[in-house]
Amino acid sequence: MTFRNKLTANLAILAIVASIVTGLVAYHISRNALREHLESRLRSVASIAALTLSADDLSRLRTPADRKTPVFRKLQSHLLDLQQAVPSIKYIYVMRKSSREETLKFVIDPTLPKDENGNGRIEDNEAPAQIGEEYNIANYPQIKYAFSGPIADNEINQDKWGYWLSGYAPVRDHTGKAVAIVGVDMSAQEILRQEGMLRRGVAIALIVMLAVSVLLSFMIASLLAHPIQVMTNSLQRLRQRDYTARVPDFDKGEIGLMTQAFNEMSQEMGSLHAELNRRHQEMKQKVEERTRELEHTHALLLEAAQERFDLAQNEIALVNAALQERNQHLQIRQRQLQAIVDFQQVILRQTTLDELFCNGFAMLTYAYMIEAGAIFYMNPETMHPERKASHNLTDQALNALESVQAPGNPDHAHEVASWEASNAMALCALLEKADMGDSTGRPMDSVVSIPFNLGDRMVGWLVVVALTGRPIEADERDLLLVFGNEFAIAADNMERKDLLAKMHQELQQRHKDVQKSHRSLEEANRKLEAYAGELSQQTAELDALNQELSENYRQLEEANWKLSEMATTDALTGLASHRALHERLADEIRRYQRYHRPFSLMMVDIDDFKEINDRVGHVRGDRILQEIAAILQRNIRQTDFAARYGGDEMALILTETRREDAAIVGERICRQVATHQFGGVQVTVSVGIAEYTEEKKHQPLLEEADQAMYNAKRSGKNTVYMLPVAPQAA
């Protein structure tokens, strides 16, 4: 596809989309404006109709029989005149609230019966609504707000008469209270007809816009495509390094400026290409010269690096020799440290002090490469040194070393150092006399005498002669000191172990004495257990008596509860008794006097119950009483109170309830009783209601409710009655 065709197609698609979006937006705006106009018109017609109706006339229409009254005919004629005055209105009607929140009751439907489908009879959707006929408004949310002010439906709704768009307005009495609403219906065919005309107009305008958009797209693409195609060919030549490519001038506008800029750019690129070729040759010569210089420098660097490498090898050889010497030294130290660890294991296995010193000194001789030496331990009883182990020393040297006296203060460093130096000198002299190797000129630091202490007491010392006169270093001396201290601690532990063994024997003897005393105590415990058995038997007898008393007390409480229940509950109906009613009524009066919380009393009496009993029998009559009591229980709250007052008369106390709200409950009870199936028997009740006020007392409230109930019976039965409120004195 050529660039011209692509540009034409893109511009046409863009124009078509813009036209469609504009048409749809215009259609929705016009449709909403039309709907708002129709809704405003419906609200206006309903408001005018509501203003022409009298709330007093509407209040006189209650039953279907009222359609024959002059008031109904007058209102019917008036509404039909309004309907004829506004031809777009199909129906007009009046409704009022009912006892149920989701329904309204028709007051006036002025429509005359008409066989619109021509089948020879009036169907339900052709007959007008009757006075009092209920209309479910659950699916019409706007009608719920019509009692507050004029309102109209947002969408078309459906009922048994067809599809409509409706408007509503309240009918108010002289106090301004909304007592009913006027509804006007516009047929959906009229609304759809007007919306159809609007759609046709928008469709025609959209077709015209699409044709114009396609034509303009073709013209614009024709003007732009040719210069762009010529410039594209020139750019391809420029891409192939043909810097002589030029674009002719088309006009003096933006395209002309673009072609002029392209020609200047092509000329500059040609000049730049020639300059780059010249610089490339110069750079090539410089690179060759630099390469020769780098090769000469590389040869000099290689010669210097070889000299440094030879020096480094010599230094590495010296370092390796030092490391080998250090490694040998570390191996010796490791062997000496391992000897200390192994000696600690030997301490755990040895059983006698002599074995400990012999085995430990043998490990010391191997680990420290000792030429000669001995270990001495102070006898704790005689406080004289005793040789425990020796190696390669003559008896003369050993006797001389045993005669050495310990330093006066082992904690004083100066005295210990002097003692060690004198021992070393004496030992060197003894070695010369013993002719042990080449002892002449033996250094002093190859012979050490190390004391080992236990606390502040020196318990022995260690004499060591290094092999071949090797000097004993400071860290070796510290390790020998650790070795000596381990000897001292192990010897002390063994002495303590012997002491503990003696103490253990004494404890065993004492344990035998304790066991003998324990057997005496066991004999005494057996006697106490015999006494405890007798006491447990007596306790069990007391527990049995307590259980018997508890069971008797429980049965007594259960009997008292049943008596209380029988006194406050009617046995037949399960409602509260006459006595319980008076007690609850007194409680509610006290609560009113303290908190001023209202409550109402309702008296319910079964109509013609004596005749029903005579006709169906007392058993069926009792069952009717029970079923009516169940209906009363279902229609009250948990805070309310139901009681059987006497015979076929029952009473309800409705807390937090005014007499008007109590009347709604009474109407619901009358309706449920009248529609309940009592086994083929039609039963109704009459209800009297009284609300407690401050000037009333207990008995007058009962009398007022009872009197209202009898007035309900005189008014035709199956109804609710309240005595008129007496006017308050000025």
Image (cartoon, rainbow, N blue to C red):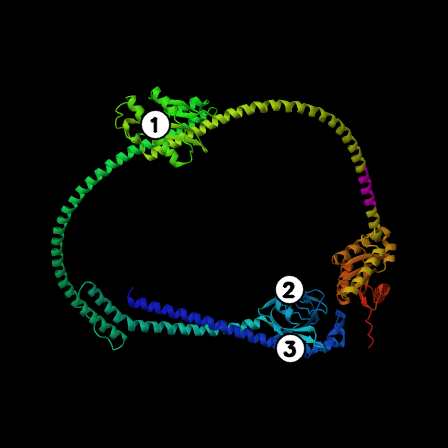
Q: Is residue 506 magenta?
A: no
Locate residue 313: give its quadrant. Answer: top left
Q: In the structure shown, which secondary structural element does the residue marked by tag 3 occupy?
A: helix
Which dot marks residue 464? Answer: 1
Q: Which circle's residue, 3 or 1, is located before the other in the chain?
A: 3
Q: Label 2: which residue?
A: 138
Mark 1 and 2 residues: CB-CB less than 8 Å, in contact?
no
The stretch of residues the image draws in magenta is 548-559
Spatial CA distance of label 3 from label 1 is 130 Å
Q: Is residue 463 left or right of residue 230?
A: right
Q: Which amino acid lies under the numbered mark 2 shown in the image of this protein?
A: Ala
Residue closer to the observer: 593 or 719: 593
- Relative to residue 215, is residue 417 depicted above or below? above
- Is residue 333 visible to the viewer in this orientation of the structure? yes
Q: Amino acid at mark 3?
A: Ser
Amino acid carrying label 1: it is Val
Q: Position of residue 475 (x, y in %)?
A: 34, 35
Alpha carbon of mark 1 to alpha carbon of mark 2: how far?
Answer: 115 Å
Residue at x-position 22% and y-position 70% = 262
Q: What x and y, as percent, mark residue 660? A: 76, 67
- What is the C-alpha distance between the residues marked 3 and 2? 23 Å
Q: Residue at x 38, y 73 (%)?
A: 211
Binning the other alpha carbons within 10 Å of mark 2 as few (below 14), some (14 to 19) or many (20 upward) gives few
Q: Disc 2 on helix, strand or loop?
A: loop
Residue 636: x and y in percent read 75, 59
Asked if residue 278 lies left or right of residue 108, the reply is left
Figure quadrant of the N terminus: bottom left
- Give the camera-side residue of 700 and 38: 700
Residue receiving disc 3: 47
Which quadrant of the view contains residue 400? Answer: top left
